[in-house]
Amino acid sequence: MATTVIPAQPISRPTNYLTNGFTLKSWLLTTDHKRIAILYLISVTLFFFLGGFFAMLIRLELLTPQGDLMHADSYNKVFTAHGMIMVFFFLIPVVPAILGNFLVPLMIGAKDLAFPRINLLSWYLYIVAGGIMIHVLLNGGVDTGWTLYSPFSTQFSNTNVIEAGIAIFIVGFSSIFTGLNFIVTVHRMRAPGLTWSRLPLFIWAQYATSLIMILGTPVIAITTVMLAVERLFHLGIFDPKLGGDPLLFQHLFWFYSHPAVYIMILPSMGVISELITCFSHKRVFGYKIVALSSIAIAVIGFLVWAHHMFVTGISLYAALIFSFITFFVGVPSAIKVFNWTATLYRGSISFATPMLYAFGFIGLFTIGGLTGLFLASLGVDVHVTDTYFVVSHFHYVMVGGVVMGYLGGMHFWWPKISGRMYPEGWAKLSALFVFVGFNLTFFPQFVLGYVGMPRRYWQYPPEFQVLNVLSTAGASVLAVGYLLPMVYFAWSLRYGPIAGPNPWNAAGLEWKTASPPPTFNFDETPVVTWEAYNYDEIEPKLEDGGIR
């Protein structure tokens, strides 16, 4: 009797956003929010290392008291390039553009963002603005400082101020489109049952950040336009020589740029809320007040801009009011830190790498926040304005806070992004390098500023050298800590253990789909019937590949 042999059918593997149509064209013309997040990841990382290169030049110059590495003009251009790139091309977009783009639809059970094509346009605007900024750097740079203060930027500087302003103008629209997309998506595309009181705190933070983006960013756009018009047509807007008011520029600049601090830090706060609750394996203490504190930070953040101007000659009464409001804006931030700490109390804490970054964030952000209260005090601010005390405070919040939150988030969601686990030992070593290197870099600068070393100078008295050597040594350790994740994340793409849908046994809709997610995120629209962070209902047993 003849036997019929049926050929084996190829195993059907589900497609995901990484493998579905893997061509350059498919990526450059994609409207998939996850692929756009990866495009942002690549481009923002490149600008991070470019800005870090200029930071390295600054620290090498300050290794010795003499200006023996570069001239004063070159040093001005280097710290201006470092500031502009890090603020506008890394710190502002890093968490919303990468983690926000990837996670917002997944966390609310949507198939994509509300406006996929606008989302892609926002990335192209970022690339165009970045290209203009690189052209500025290759064509001589800018020497005004990243704040572009008038009258130096309007009258005295002969560098590429207008071109740098155009780059800031264009990248601002990238932020506006991203914020608009997030707001509409959260309002209109939440899964059935996902009420406002069930939203992840990361979504609350992104929503508050988006409000600042669409309300504050047009102000800096208009300001850079007026700056360009002033230089081109010599109108008396900011230039006192032409009848303008240089303080008007500072009011407009800081009306955006102080809320921009919260564009940077609020998304990382949302990340930390997710990490604390997952690795404590319990619901966030005071969920509603933590959620509302994000909105409070966004609102009050628009009312404190003039604390950057205490020594500019503004009214004493105005300075007192802004000083008081600045103290008040610290309250919702303190609420978050208190509630995170209360969440840890009697929690089932595991010390996986994301949690180490969460602990690092709390420590560094607390130092940055407390030193901000010194700068809110009129008497102390007069003493330390334009010293390295301000530089250190800024970096403790912006770099210590934002980057710690970003790296914690990348380690937490990397299995979801890539479908692979990374080497936990190397990741913990990297977290240690980042924390130790950061404190060694920037804590000595508090002392330097207090004893009177001004910022933006390429020479300094010899008695300041020891602290500057410590700071430069710390920057070297910090650089290693930043480089390691790039290496082992790339390694894990090929050799890392396969991650299941939920390797951390975490709560949230993003963990209820495959890793990496399919193109449209969910096979069926999920229906939410549980409260946020329902860890008391989650089976404590982890999937294979998880770490606890």
Image (tube, rainbow, N blue to C red):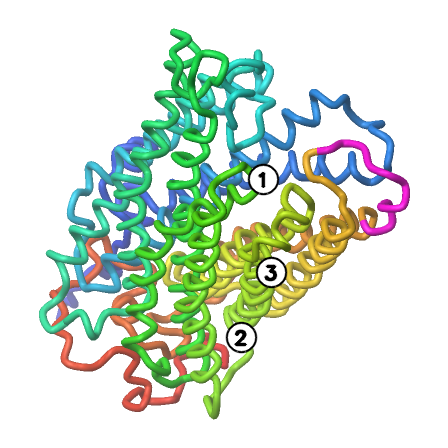
**Disc 3: which residue:** 371
Q: Is residue 163 magenta?
A: no
Judged from the image, the secondary structure of the residue bearing numbered disc 3 is helix
Q: From the viewer's perspective, is 45 left or right of 339?
A: right
* Rendered image quadrant of residue 74: top right
Q: Of helix, strand and loop, which one carries label 2?
A: loop
In the picture as drawn, the residue positioned furthest to the right comes out as 462
Q: Is residue 102 visible?
A: yes
Q: Compute the Cα span from label 3 to label 1.
A: 28 Å
**Residue 56: x %, y % from top left:** 70, 39
Q: Amino acid at mark 2?
A: Ala
- At 86% across and 36% down in the image, what residue appears? 65
Q: Amino acid at mark 1?
A: Phe
Per the rendered image, the range of residues in magenta is: 457-467
Which mark, residue 352? 2
Residue 398 or 241: which is nearer the viewer? 241
**Residue 59 in picture, x, y percent from top left:** 74, 40
Element under disc 1? helix
Q: Between tags 1 and 2, which lies in front?
A: 1
What is the crowding at mark 2: few (fewer than 14 residues within 10 Å), some, or many (at least 20)? many
Residue 67, above or below 298:
above
Asked if the residues shown at circle 1 and circle 2 are in contact, with their CB atoms under 8 angstroms apart, the answer is no
Earlier in the chain: of badge 3 and badge 1, it is: 1
* Numbered badge on residue 49: 1
Which residue is found at the position 9% from the left and 69% from the top?
192
Instruction: Kindly indicate the quadrant of the structure image that contains residue 169.
Output: top left
